[in-house]
Image (spheres, rainbow, N blue to C red):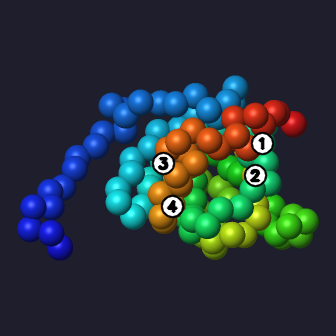
Amino acid sequence: MAENAKPTWYRWDDMPRERVSAQLERRLITGERLMLAHVYLERGCIVPTHAHENEQITYILQGALRFWFGAAGETEMVVRAGEVVHIPSNLPHRAEALEDTLDVDIFAPPRQDWLDKTDSYLREHTTR
């Protein structure tokens, strides 16, 4: 641990809320080796199939998401409030918000495409 390392305090309500698409917003907190996000999805929001090197943990605080995992979406799972799904690195996945949903996503390492706003798969997606 670095001798000059200091903790950083955050309050979700003070964090900027980024509108990514018509049905998806998020707030981000980023450290050196991980990223924490609040993701707000309106019912019917589709997160298109994508994969990333980042390991992901998704914890649903409110609502529910239906996930499809694998290149052809061969594994389907509904994750509801109080439930968590771990998504390994490079596993293709997509999701649909079954109701208005707030989830907490944790990524390691941080999602550089989210920081750079080059996540076009999210910005260009449409509703079902």
In this view, 31 is above or below 85: above
Q: Position of residue 51 (x, y in %)?
A: 71, 61
Q: Which residue is mark 1?
A: 46
Q: Quadrant of the N terminus?
A: bottom left
Q: Which residue is mark 2?
A: 95
Question: What is the secondary structure assignment of the residue under circle 2?
Answer: strand
For the residue marked with disc 3, what is the amino acid?
Ala
The one nearer the camera, 82 or 117, is: 117
In this view, 25 is above or below 73: above
Q: Which residue is mark 3?
A: 37
**Residue at point 52% right, 31% down?**
18
User: Horizontal placement of 124 versus 12: left or right?
Assistant: right
Q: Label 1: how many residues lie within 10 Å, few (<14), some (14-19) or many (20+)?
A: many
**Residue at point 87% right, 36% down?**
128
Residue 13, quarter of the rendered image: top left
Residues marked 1 and 4 touching at CB (< 8 Å): no
Question: What is the secondary structure assignment of the residue under circle 4?
Answer: strand
Q: Which mark is residue 107?
A: 4
**Residue at point 28% right, 43% down?**
10
Residue 25 in view of the camera: yes
User: Horizontal placement of 63 versus 124: left or right?
Assistant: left
For the residue marked with disc 2, what is the amino acid?
Ala
Q: Label 3: how many residues lie within 10 Å, few (<14), some (14-19) or many (20+)?
A: some
Q: Position of residue 84 (x, y in %)?
A: 58, 64
First in sequence: mark 2 or mark 3? 3
Q: What whole-number distance in Å separates the C-alpha atoms at marks 1 and 2?
A: 6 Å
